[in-house]
Image (cartoon, rainbow, N blue to C red):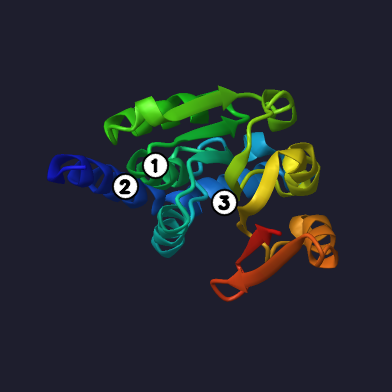
């Protein structure tokens, strides 16, 4: 890891976070579209909906501290979180498998990841995560959940057989109602998972026992 690589990552993140400041306009447009029907992912095809810089630093440090190499992400969006994950994976000689439903987001994320110099560490899959990850069978060191909230639990259960002792799961937006089924599931399984909330309850970190 050299200074050029570090600067490339941080400069790319700065550009993306600056653009994400306009999300309030993009989200507003999406909410208007969903005024007369349930919200859909397509309503937010132009919105970053990013993790915070604090969250990004947290997941990067968790991966480094625990020497996680195989990382799976649900919800690429425009790639901000993926860049944090991949930067840590690079330092650990690991890789990230990430999945994004919307093609326009996936294409832009791919460019953003390339701008950060991290393409070699990312396998970006486009489509419904229940399909793009249905055949995934490698051990998972770190799972990042930040896609459509109703899918947290189904996707988690799809991948659960890939967990091993000390697998870490970081679930964002746990203060949203759509994640309640996942919360109920993981909090009841105290014999399998130890879970704590962080960032004032916005996220859960769980460890597989």
Query: Distance between the Cα atoms at labels 2 and 3?
Result: 24 Å
Pick whichever of labels 2 and 3 is earlier in the sequence: 2
At mark 2, the secondary structure is helix
What residue sits 46% from the left and 61% below the top?
55
Q: Is residue 22 shown above or below 110? A: below
What residue sits 39% from the left and 42% below the top?
83
Instruction: Name the residue at the left extreme.
Output: 3
| Residue 189 x/y as whole percent | 83, 62
Pick whichever of labels 3 and 1 is earlier in the sequence: 3
Q: Are marks 1 and 2 in contact (CB under 8 Å)?
A: yes
Residue 30 located left or right of residue 2: right
Q: Comparing marks 2 and 3, which lies closer to the viewer?
A: 2
Residue 54 visible somewhere in the drawing:
yes
| Residue 125 x/y as whole percent | 57, 24
Name the residue tied to disc 3. 28
Q: Residues within 10 Å of mark 3 (few under 14, many from 20)?
A: few
């Amino acid at each position: 890891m050299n200074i050029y690589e570090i600067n490339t990552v941080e400069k790319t993140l700065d550009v993306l976070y600056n653009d994400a400041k306009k999300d309030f306009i993009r989200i507003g447009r999406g909410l208007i579209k969903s005024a007369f029907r349930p919200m859909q992912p397509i309503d937010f095809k132009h919105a970053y909906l990013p993790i915070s810089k604090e969250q990004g630093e947290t997941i990067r440090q968790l991966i480094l501290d625990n020497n996680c190499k195989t990382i799976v992400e649900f919800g690429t969006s425009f790639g901000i979180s993926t860049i944090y994950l991949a930067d840590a994976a690079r330092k650990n000689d690991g890789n990230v498998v990430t999945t994004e439903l919307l093609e326009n987001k996936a294409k832009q994320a791919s460019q953003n990841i390339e701008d950060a110099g991290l393409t070699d560490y990312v396998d970006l899959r486009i489509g419904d995560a229940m399909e793009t990850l249905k055949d995934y069978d490698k051990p998972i060191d770190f799972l990042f959940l930040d896609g459509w909230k109703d899918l947290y639990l189904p996707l988690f259960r799809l991948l659960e057989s890939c967990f091993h002792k000390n697998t870490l799961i970081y679930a964002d937006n746990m203060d949203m109602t759509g994640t309640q089924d996942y919360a109920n599931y993981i909090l009841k399984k105290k014999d399998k998972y130890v879970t704590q909330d962080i960032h004032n309850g916005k996220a859960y970190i769980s460890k597989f026992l």
